Image (cartoon, rainbow, N blue to C red):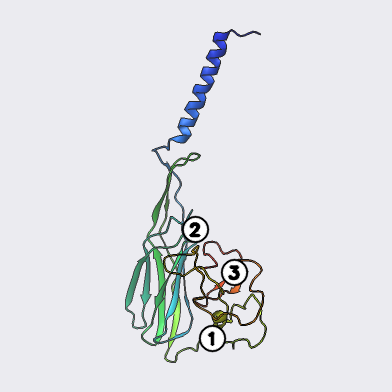
Amino acid sequence: MAFSKVKVKTIVASFFLMLTMIFAVFALPSTIAVILPERDTYAYVTVSPNPIGVGQTALVVMWLTEPLPSALFGWEGFLLTVTKPDGTNETLGPYRSESTGSTFALYTPTEVGTYFFQFSFPGQWLNQSATAFSPATERFYRASTSNRYELTVQSAPIPSYPTVPLPEDYWERPIYGENRDWSIIGGNFLDPAGIAGLGSFGIGMANLFTTGPETPHVMWTRQHDFGGIVGGPDDRGYYTGLSYQRKWR
């Protein structure tokens, strides 16, 4: 069946008009957000070491089982209630979580006895902006409170972990994660990081944290560490697949 030139031009014009309307819909974010169903949250808290001595510092970790969509987001208003041996309460916070849904606090008990730690989340709206492929959304995450975590505080301080002597002979990576004192020999020989004003990709090279080797040897065969104690400014350990911390500083 033959089409006239007028009909062909009309069909082509209609097609381009339709495409223009489709692109306009996706290019312009909707101002009306989609309200998603509310979601439960589950709060947890833990304290270590346990037991601990009076005057020693404990690490308190609080988290929700619900992570966040990106590093731009964080749960707000974390409160930590500490019940002391005499029955009085102390409230710490508010804290903001990382995108993993967790955060931490340090606490130093001042008396012998049993302490209780309880973490509460007040609930929060999570709003995500529209993109070219999805509308804006809003969802309310319900409040939750953890069980109480019991910490035993004794008069005698607990001993720190034993140290491992530095090697006196040939050694290789990865440095076992519990050999934390070995960080002083494990740093980068020529480290571009840490030079004032240059940042991690600076042109300067210096060994700021460790002693350089005195014999020819292979320092590394690939740039990224694959586990254990990396070395450098502290005794931090890394593991394969670390998601958001750079291995060389």
Q: Quadrant of residue 7?
A: top right
* Amino acid type for the residue under numbered disc 3: Tyr
Which of disc 1 and disc 2 is earlier in sequence? 2
Label 3 vs label 2: CA separation? 21 Å
- The x, y position of residue 36, in whole percent, is 45, 45
* Amino acid type for the residue under numbered disc 1: Tyr
Q: Which residue is mark 1?
A: 161
Which residue is rendered at x = 49% and y = 22% of the image?
A: 17
In contact (CB < 8 Å): disc 3 and disc 1: no
Label 2 vs label 1: CA separation? 32 Å
Q: Which residue is mark 2?
A: 67
Which of disc 1 and disc 3 is earlier in sequence? 1
**In this picture, is 197 found above or below 138?**
below
- The x, y position of residue 187, in whole percent, is 55, 76
Image side of residue 143 versus residue 159, left or right: left
Label 3 vs label 1: CA separation? 21 Å
The label nearer to you, 2 versus 1, is 1
Q: Quadrant of residue 173?
A: bottom right
Q: Which residue is mark 3?
A: 239
Which residue is rendered at x = 42% and y = 56% of the image?
A: 142
- The x, y position of residue 140, in whole percent, is 41, 51
Image side of residue 89 versus residue 72, left or right: left
* Amino acid type for the residue under numbered disc 2: Pro
Badge 3 crowding class, 10 Å Cα cut-off, few under 14, some 14 to 19, many 20 or more, is: some
Q: Secondary structure at mark 1?
A: loop
